[in-house]
Every structure is written in C-alpha cells, then in structure tokens.
Image (cartoon, rainbow, N blue to C red):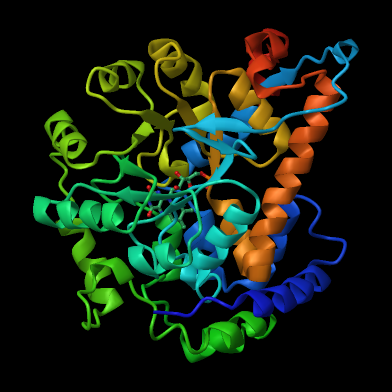
Amino acid sequence: MPEAPKSGEAESIAKQGIRAWGRSGYSLAAIGDLARRTLPRPVFDFADGGAEDEYSLCRNEAAFAGHELLPRPLNGAADRDLSVELFGRRLALPVIIGPTGLSGLFWPGGEIAAARAAASAGTAFCLSHGSTCTIEALAATGVAPRWMQVFVYRDRGLTRAFVERAAAAGYDALVLTTDNQLLGNRERDIRNGFSIPPSFTALQILGMTGKLPWLLRMRRELGRITFANYAKPGETVELAAIAGRMASLLDPGLSWRDVDWLRGLWKGPLLLKGILHPLEAAEAVPRGIDGLIVSNHGGRQLDGVPATLDALPAVAAAIDGRIPVLLDGGVRRGGDVVKALSLGAVACLIARPQLWGLAVAGEAGVARVLDILRRELDRALGLMGITRLAELGPDCLRSVRESLPPDRIR
Ligand SMILES: Cc1cc2nc3c(=O)[nH]c(=O)nc-3n(C[C@H](O)[C@H](O)[C@H](O)COP(=O)(O)O)c2cc1C
C-alpha cells in the first residue's frame, strides 16, 4: 500500500504546493489547469474525461449556468452558518468528497491525504471501492465522518465482505453506486492507451519533461498501486488483473432485491448513488434507504443522460423532504452549491476537483479546493442575504431559459 505523507511532510508539501500554484490556484478551474500541466495526459484524461461524446459531462457543468441567483441583500446576512446536519452529524460545509477510484495515482496515498483534508474542513469523505489504500488503513487514521462506497457483485459474498469490513472499521455511512454495473465507454482512455497501472512508452516519457515532479513523486508508487480492497491479507494482486476482472465481477442484473438485501446487512445510513429518475427515487423511501445522491457518475457512464442539476428538482419533489437528497456532477463554484441547495439538495459532492487538488499539492491541495468552495459559498450567501442554508429555495433562483433563446444557453 502506498504510504500517505505524514502530517509534517504534508505541511511542507503544502508550502511547496502553494508556491507552485502561486497566484494561479485561485479557483477550482485554475487548480484544474495546474493539474492539467502537472499530470501526464493519459492520467489527467482518465479523471477529466467522460463517456462517448461527453454530452452528459458537459451538460453537468453547463446546467449551473442555466440558473441565475436572485439576491435579497436587504435581509442583512452579517453572520452566515454554512453547516448542515446529515445522518445525525453536523458538517461544517455542505460539500463532501465523493468516491474516486485510484486517487493514489494523483498523489502518493491520495485517499488518505484527501480524507485528512476533508476532516480538517469539518466534512465527510467517501472512500471508493477502488481505493489504493484499504478500508481499514483509512479508518486507522481516525478521519471522520467517513463513508464507504460499494458495488453489488455477481458474487454477493464479495459485496457482503466489503460491507462487513466497512462496519467493522466504523464507517459512518454506506453508499451503493447503482450506475456502474457495466463499465462506461470512455473514449479518451482508448485514444490515450490508458492502462492500469499506467505504463508509458520511452517516447511518451521523453515528451513529459513538464511532468517530471509527478514522475519523481510517483516513481516508487506506480509499480505498487493496486485496488487495495480486493487483495486478501498478505496477498499481492496485480492491478491490471483486477482491472480486467472488474467488468465480470459487477452484476448488471442489480435490482431492488439487492438493495433490500443490502438494507438488511448494513445497519447504518445507506445511500443510493446514481439516481436520476423520480420514480426510482420515490421507490427508495419505502425500502428504508436513508439518502439519495443524484448523480450521473460525472458523465462517465451512460452518455446522453441529463445534467444532474436538471434531474434534481423532479427527484427532490418525489422525495418531498422525507430523506436527504444530495447531488454531484459539475460543482465547481460556491454559487453552484447555492443553486443545487436551492433546487432541493441538502449537500453536494465533488470528485474531479479533489483529484486536481491532490495532483497539485496532496492534502494541502484538497484543503485548498475545499477552502475556495467554503469562501465562495459564504460570499455568495452574504451577497444573497441568506443566513442559513435552510433559507435556500426555488425563490432564490431564476431560470435563464425563461429569458434567453435556446441558442444562447450553454
Ligand atoms: C477518476 C474518477 C474515479 C471515480 N471513481 C468512482 C468510484 O470508484 N465509485 C463511484 O461511485 N464513483 C466514482 N466516480 C464518480 C464520482 O464519484 C462522481 O459521481 C462524479 O465524478 C461527480 O462529478 P464531478 O467529477 O464533476 O465532481 C469517479 C469519478 C472520477 C472522475
């Protein structure tokens, strides 16, 4: 397992990172640009890309531009409370780090670094099934709240083992991802010849002089990176072998029966991730699901599905406040969080931006990403005249579609 940088180390890396981004790491998009310059193209594209024509990927971000904020500054919002209560815990920020497989490809011990940044910011971190550290290794750091993301496999015993390990390691919530039972067709990865673990031709390495810091940082890691949760204790598992097997492990027959089974297995909060349809959302409530994540997997799975922000209002209406609805996909600004919460989400998750933060400065980079979002959200609320997140609602927004001809909407 790759080792996460120790705390002191992280601080010095932080300083290096901050020096490295200088005046350019002022927004999530700017940190994304730095990550683009830091990472080899196939690695950057692995995170950045979506499925097929990337329609849904593009729509996720663009949908936020389809809404304008309607401020009421005379409300006088001198003090703003950004905290939100979720599953009995108060988070300092309505932004959670979503699950991303292979975060350790972006920074040594990437998952642990990102989880530490989330905990310091007072928010939750969701570990991916495909993490490069184990469920137990992340738990051993004591970061909290920590959530665990799982799949349903053809071999239900494998799913059961993940769930039991998460329970034994004290995870606070379980997230079942429902939109990944067949692997998306990610054409950038095909074009770049991206493989797991990444391997580069001599010619590619020659063209990578600008990527030298990443190569040096990762030189000891690359050969060792693995989907750590799939290795039995004491066993080393070839990453390429697991990656190849992954498609056959997943069960495309996933259904509500499996959700019921999982509900019986996991006693804590259980969330479904990948919900877009209001009927599916409504079905989750009588089945005892505790929360939904409106998600299209960042446009990486079924291309052609709606932007998550566009799908959110119907899902929120179907749920009608009975369980929390969260949203991910394209959240890049504090103002985006305001829009998602106004349309019915209680919190958002971010995925790519935390990978960009990791690529630039590890834990400090993710801390920077969260801090930018916190400051942007706080400023937006202050200018909107909003004191508490619960005050946000559809009356805080105006749809751009009401005023612009369709060809003027991104
Ligand atoms: C590199 C990468 C790996 C991901 N791995 C997982 C995963 O293992 N499990 C999962 O449920 N979602 C995974 N996702 C999807 C994210 O959790 C999330 O739904 C989506 O990326 C959110 O959109 P955003 O990247 O625009 O913030 C991954 C996304 C990326 C970019």
Q: Relative to 309, does residue 209 appear above or below in the rendering?
A: below
Res. 331 visible in picture: yes
Nearest the viewer among 144 and 372 is: 144
In which quarter of the view is residue 81 placed? Answer: top right
327 relative to 173, above or below: above
Pick the quarter of the image with the C terminus: top right
Residue drawn at x 81%, y 15% is 71
Left or right relative to 343: residue 384: right
At a point 23% along the width and 46% down the height, the residue shown is: 181
The percent position of residue 198, horizontal first and vertical second, equals: 42, 77
Q: Residue 199 in the image: x percent, y percent?
A: 42, 82
Q: How many marks?
A: 0
Q: Is residue 278 above or below residue 37?
A: above
Q: Is residue 184 visible?
A: no
Picture quadrant where residue 283 is located:
top left
Picture coordinates of residue 49 (x, y %)?
Answer: 50, 53
Q: Is residue 185 left or right of residue 115?
A: left
Against 332, residue 335 (above or below) is above
Quadrant assignment for the N terminus: bottom left
Q: For this view, does 61 lie left or right of residue 225?
A: right
Q: State the residue at coordinates (39%, 12%).
A: 318
Residue 95, percent across and down? 59, 40
Q: Is residue 104 found left or right of 178 in the rendered image?
A: right
Give the image quarter of residue 236. Answer: bottom left
Compare residues 344 and 356 and report the one nearer the observer.
344
